[in-house]
Amino acid sequence: MDGALRVRVTVHNGESRVAESYARAPYHYLPIIQRDGDLPLLTIVNSSGGILGGDVLEARIDLDAHAAVILRQQAATKVYRSASGPARSLCHFVLGEGAWLDYFPDEIIPFAGSVYAQTTRVELAPHAVMLFGELVTAGRLARGERFAFTRLTLDVQCTAGGALLLRDRADLEPAREWLENPAILGDATLWGAFYLLTTAPVDGAVVEDIDEILRAAGDGRGGASSAPSGIVGRVVGTSLETVRDGLQLARTRVAERFSVGEPG
């Protein structure tokens, strides 16, 4: 499977709309929904129901100056056993000046024997803001799969003006490292990452607020810190709802502090 998606969002008559698009199966997207009192919603759909070894998925989302959308997936990312090489996913986001993108996909579920590499690249123009979250489970826990995947690689990169501001990479191989080590994940069965990506300065009070939210979501095993590109946070836990709610609360708090399309 070799899926591709290209979407460019622009502002027309004061509304963010899709100006150009291209999709190759299994990718497609649902038309933007304009919602009163909230940002427009753009939904990405993967009609295959999961990712197999050897699959390559590439998506690029461009937001023109001052465009603003909430981007969502229609379901969790299920990564099946890899029998023919790793599965790969590349998401490339390009934000124009003053653009705003809110992207919190559902969880990644790496099945037993899966090999999956996901790369997220973000390019920021001045005053652009992206809220981004990742949520990963230890596997299909109901079937007794706990860190039974072969390898999982997550790579987040953020650039502005051609300079690399942030690279955050995780490369996990359960057979070679004891992930239940108290210094790594302990008894946690899922973990989440929170990113505020912006070139604008971030008030220290915002960082402290997000740090407190993530600590509470992970029973003390979470937190956030400032970064050259904004804020990076982590949380681990045993409850999908608690960790997900913590990430969403962090998202809401940051959105309240930053005005869409305006300098931070």
Image: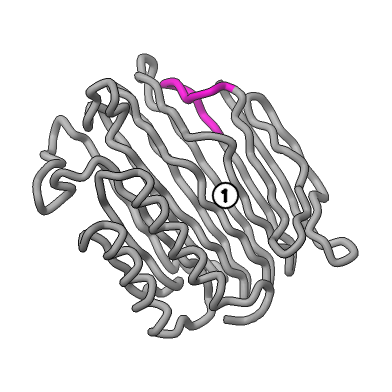
Q: Which residues are magenta?
A: 48-57
Q: Secondary structure at mark 1?
A: strand
Residue assigned mark 1:
92
The three-letter amino acid code for the residue at tag 1 is His
Q: Please, which residue is most extreme toward the right here?
A: 13
The colour style of the image is one colour
Number of residues whose C-alpha sits closer than 10 Å to that of mark 1, classed few (under 14), some (14–19) or many (20 or more):
some
Q: Please, which residue is most extreme toward the top here?
A: 83
Residue 172 % position (x, y): 24, 40
As displayed, is residue 2 above or below residue 84? below
Q: Nearer the viewer, residue 94 or 256?
A: 256
Residue 74 % position (x, y): 59, 36
The quarter of the image holding the C terminus is bottom right
As displayed, is residue 178 above or below residue 134? above
Query: Residue at the spot x=39%, y=49% of the render?
Result: 155
Query: Residue at the spot x=68%, y=73% of the render?
Result: 261
Residue 55 on the magenta span: yes
Query: Residue at the spot x=64%, y=62% of the render?
Result: 95
Q: Quadrant of residue 180?
A: top left
Query: How many numbered discs, if any?
Result: 1
